[in-house]
Image (cartoon, grey):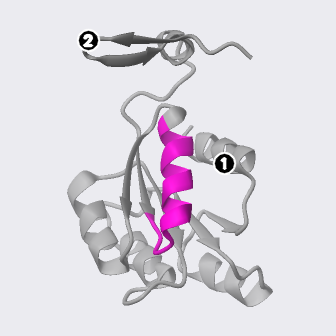
Amino acid sequence: MRNDTFFLSSGKIDLAKELKRSEGWLPVNKKILIIDDDRGTRALLTKLLSDAGYEVFSEEEGLVGLETAKSIDPDLIILDVFMPGFNGYHICNELKLDEKFKNIPIIILTSRNEDVERTIADEVGADLFMSKPFDTNNILHSVERLLN
């Protein structure tokens, strides 16, 4: 596989990414907020989504993530369920009850793939429920589908 990355005095440019962006293949200025207490998950999702052209923000605590959502107006939110303080269900419910955020797609991402967890995710208004470990292609396609 060929990697056309060039370095300039201002940094590096990935020509394939820039070509895709110029042809409308990559999102422009779409902001995604990741709220997950697992550093590895945050790092993987941040890299994956940044490489796909999204502007990514991440937080490890629920309450801080909720405040970040209110300040950056994300286009999509990916939430872990089990975090210290506010859990993902609580955050999803808070956002979906707010007129400003009720139409923002929210993906619930959890290590528990049980029917009761899916039911709770539906009840709090999550747009998609996904379990960990996750397939990166599936995450990307889901994000693209929810944003279009």
Percent coordinates x, y for residue 86 in the rendering? 39, 86
Direction from residue 78 to residue 127 in the image, left or right? right
Residue 67: say if magenta.
no
Q: Say which of marks 2 and 1 sits in front.
A: 2
The residue carrying mark 2 is: 9
Q: Quadrant of residue 61?
A: bottom left
CA distance separating discs 2 and 1:
36 Å
Percent coordinates x, y for residue 40 in the rendering? 54, 63
Q: Quadrant of residue 148?
A: top right
Looking at the figure, which quarter contains the N terminus? top right
The residue carrying mark 1 is: 142
As drawn, the label of residue 131 is: none
Q: Nearer the viewer, residue 63 or 101?
A: 63
Circle 2: element type: loop
Q: In the displayed image of the protein, which residue is found farthest to the left? A: 71
Direction from residue 129 to residue 105 in the image, left or right? left
Percent coordinates x, y for residue 25 in the rendering? 57, 20
Segment tinted magenta in the rendering: 35-50
Q: Residue at x 21, y 58 (%)?
A: 71
Q: Residue at x 73, y 66 (%)?
A: 133
Name the main secondary structure of what is drawn in magenta: helix
Q: Nearer the viewer, residue 47 or 62?
A: 47
Q: Residue flagged by tag 1: what amino acid is it?
A: Ser
Q: Residue at x 66, y 48 (%)?
A: 142
